Image: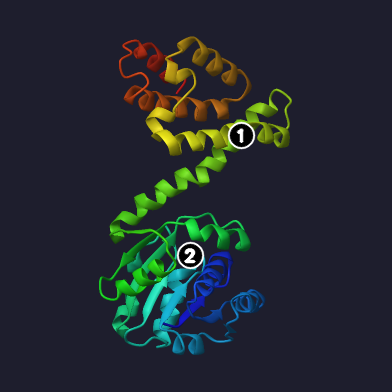
Amino acid sequence: MRIGFIGAGKVGTAFGIYLKGKGITVKGYFSRSNASCIKAALRTESNSYCDLKHLAEESDILFITTSDDQIEAVINKLCCDSLLRSGQLIVHMSGALPSTILSPAKAFGCYVYSLHPLQAFASIDQSVIALSDTYFCLEGDQEKISILEDILLRCENIYFKLKPEQKVLYHASACMLSNYLVTLIHSGLKLMDKIDIDSTTAFKAMLPLINSTIQNVTDFGTENALTGPISRGDTRIVAKQLEEINAVSKDQLDLYACMAAETLKLARLSKLRDNHNTEELKSLIESFL
């Protein structure tokens, strides 16, 4: 199967390099940016297309790897210019959008899918390396879906299949665990700045703690990995923290109190399951929300 990419950014380029490394034919790229198109083609030893028509003609599978807000425009262009043919697979790689956004292509006898790698594409080279351990989410037409499954199996990637209507919650979960983790780290570093420890030094100091926490979740699961004053039911310590944060940063207080409330719910599942004195801690936290 010949694979073509519409969009030559980090996702399209990294995935193309990854597929080529697995012996899968990458036909080439089309992009609004000629420079990025040429770079992606060079990295994959494929072709840089100046027009969409020729890429579509020479591809059995078209991956749309543009930004999310351009996917609909791309599929409309392909359809309006009659660039598609029966039997082609049209695949976008957005985590947020379902395959149904590609539905206009079905009028041409195409099959539509979304294939999303659970990875943050910060750089091309790092992403190519990380893709070997990346899980994928696949959804779309049942006919021909085995072709994409075979590609993932050949690449030895684990995947799970969703229904189109499940994509929103799937992506929200990914945002919480990836994007908002960055926000949480940033917020913690801002508190360190309040005691005159700069963010660079603070992050270096906190990184082993962050890594060990992730490792604990890996080894023991979320319920048993939880540590800290809330997991011990230490109302006195939590009260002092809330009061001090309230004195220096109202913005940080909102986040801390919300996280504390959710952490208490988690602690009650395991660490504080048999502790009957959690209502005082609950009332304390709620008084700052």
Q: Is residue 40 visible?
A: yes
On residue 69, the disc is 2
Q: Which x, y percent locates residue 246?
A: 57, 20
Q: Nearer the viewer, residue 127 or 70?
A: 127
Horizontal side of 178 relative to 91 (left or right) equals right
Q: Which x, y percent locates residue 91?
A: 40, 72
Horizontal side of 179 relative to 104 (left or right) equals right
Q: Is residue 284 above or below residue 208?
A: above
Residue at the location (29% across, 82% down)? 107
Q: Is residue 102 visible?
A: no
Residue at the location (36% across, 78% down)? 89
Q: Quadrant of the N terminus?
A: bottom left
Q: Of the two numbered discs 1 and 2 on the same chain, state the one appearing first in sequence.
A: 2
The quadrant in which residue 220 appears is top left
Q: Which residue is mark 1?
A: 208
Mark 1 is on which residue type? Pro
Q: Which x, y percent locates residue 233?
A: 42, 14
Disc 2 crowd rating (10 Å Cα; few below 14, some 14-19, many 20+) is: few
Q: In what element is the residue under mark 2? A: helix
Q: In what element is the residue under mark 1? A: helix
Q: Is residue 258 above or below residue 44?
A: above
Horizontal side of 168 relative to 43 (left or right) equals left
Mark 2 is on which residue type? Asp
Rounded to the nearest angstrom, the CA distance separating label 1 from label 2 is: 38 Å
The quadrant in which residue 127 appears is bottom right
Q: Which x, y percent locates residue 188?
A: 60, 31
Residue at the location (37% across, 51% down)? 170
On residue 260, the disc is none
